[in-house]
Amino acid sequence: MRNKKIFLVLTAIFSLLQSINGEVSLTTSVNKNQLTIGDIVRYQVIFTYNENIKIDLPSIGGNLGGFEIKNFEDKPAYQNEKKEWIKEYNYDITTFFTGIFIIPALDFPYMDEKNEKVVLKSDEHRLEVLSLTTEGDQDIRDIKPPMEIPYDYTYWIIAGISAVL
């Protein structure tokens, strides 16, 4: 029983020291790993940090491999029930090429409580982009010729009848 109390006290002290130390965590995710050409994928970056930390989001536009950014969302920071700050960035990305693509591990710098620059590295994400065509649709079909507009003979019929009368 005494060992259990000591363990709980040490755990509480360790948790308090971690929160005072200003620990930062970084989570990145994608909403799907397999998509077809033109599909939108949400690439989400979430920072969890204490209030004395300054997050500095780098420009990642050119670092997403064969993907292009269609939309960017910078959500306001908020506090969770543990009094940690949560900052969320969402990127809607797409590609028009097929194959296996990797969103590389990206560097995310921040300034810690001592005003020193620290860099967190994100996870890599592997995405498979499939073609829209199926096995039977491999040939490209020719386009249909333009439709002809039917000629309206009403004017000539009325003009002919008027000339006879």
Image: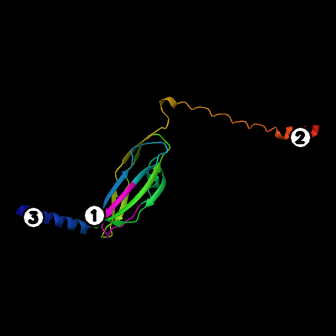
Front position among marks 1 and 3: 3
- Determine whether 17 is above or below 131 in the image: below
Return the mark for residue 6.
3
Q: Which residue is mark 2?
A: 159
Q: Is residue 51 magenta?
A: yes
Amino acid at circle 1: Glu
- Residue 79: give x, y in percent of width and height: 32, 67
Disc 1 secondary structure class = loop
Q: Is residue 71 magenta?
A: no
Q: Which comes before the other along the chain, label 3 or label 2? A: 3
Disc 2 secondary structure class = helix
Pointers 3 and 2 in contact (C-beta within 8 Å): no
Return the mark for residue 123.
none
Q: Residue at x 36, y 49 (%)?
A: 124
Q: Quadrant of the N terminus?
A: bottom left
- Residue 92: give x, y in percent of width and height: 45, 53
Q: Which residues are magenta?
A: 44-57
Amino acid at circle 2: Ala
Point out the residue furthest to the left here.
2
Q: Residue at x 28, y 65 (%)?
A: 81
Amino acid at circle 3: Ile
Q: Which comes before the other along the chain, label 1 or label 3? A: 3
Mark 2 packing: few (<14 Cα in 10 Å), some, or many (20+)?
few
- Residue 89: give x, y in percent of width and height: 40, 59
Q: Nearer the viewer, residue 150 or 102?
A: 150
Disc 3 secondary structure class = helix
For the residues labelled 1 and 3, the Cα–Cα distance comes to 24 Å
Q: Which residue is mark 1?
A: 23
Pointers 1 and 3 in contact (C-beta within 8 Å): no
- Residue 22: give x, y in percent of width and height: 28, 67
- Determine whether 28 is above or below 39 in the image: below
